[in-house]
Amino acid sequence: MIVKFLFAVLTACCVFLHIAVPPASADEMNAAKLFTANCAACHAGGLNRVVAAKTLKKDALDKYGMYSVEKVAYQITKGKNAMPAFGKKLSADEIQAIAAYVIDQADHNWGKG
């Protein structure tokens, strides 16, 4: 009797967790891989290893007028100051995916709660 109850509770928890935390889509996983391969050397965890104040965190993006997919995509494409341009290395779709990933990560504090 108790085994059936525990099994039911465990099953309910598994179903809840599966619904509450859907797996990342292929696009999200691809964007994360693109970011890791092209951006993480300077921007791992949303930081900026060159200009410490200009992180990819939401408050810094807001402060510097960069909190939008379009503005992040433009900066990735054209580069600025110490940041190189990626417009000839990455496709427009790849740049858009990375920009959307940056904004999504900023909205979620780069996974830090």
Image (spheres, helix red, strand yellow):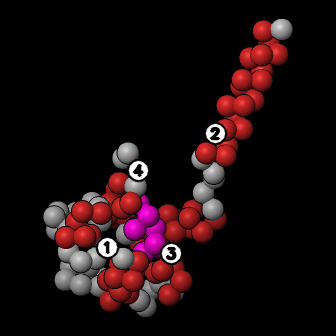
Q: Give the structural element (helix, strand or loop) at label 1.
A: loop
User: Start and end of the magenta stretch?
Assistant: 98-105
**Where does label 3 land, which residue?**
97
- C-alpha gap between disc 4 and disc 1: 18 Å
**Where does label 2 land, which residue?**
17
Which quadrant of the structure image shows residue 63? bottom left
Residue that extends furthest to the top in the rendered view of this protein: 1
33 shown above or below 98 = above
113 shown above or below 64 = above
The numbered mark, 3 or 2, whose residue comes first in the sequence reads: 2
Q: Give the structural element (helix, strand or loop) at label 2.
A: helix
Q: Residue at x 52, y 69 (%)?
A: 31
Q: Residue at x 56, y 64 (%)?
A: 28
User: In the image, what residue type sits under mark 3?
Assistant: Ala
The numbered mark, 4 or 2, whose residue comes first in the sequence reads: 2
**Where does label 1 land, which residue?**
67
Callout in the foreground (3, 2): 2
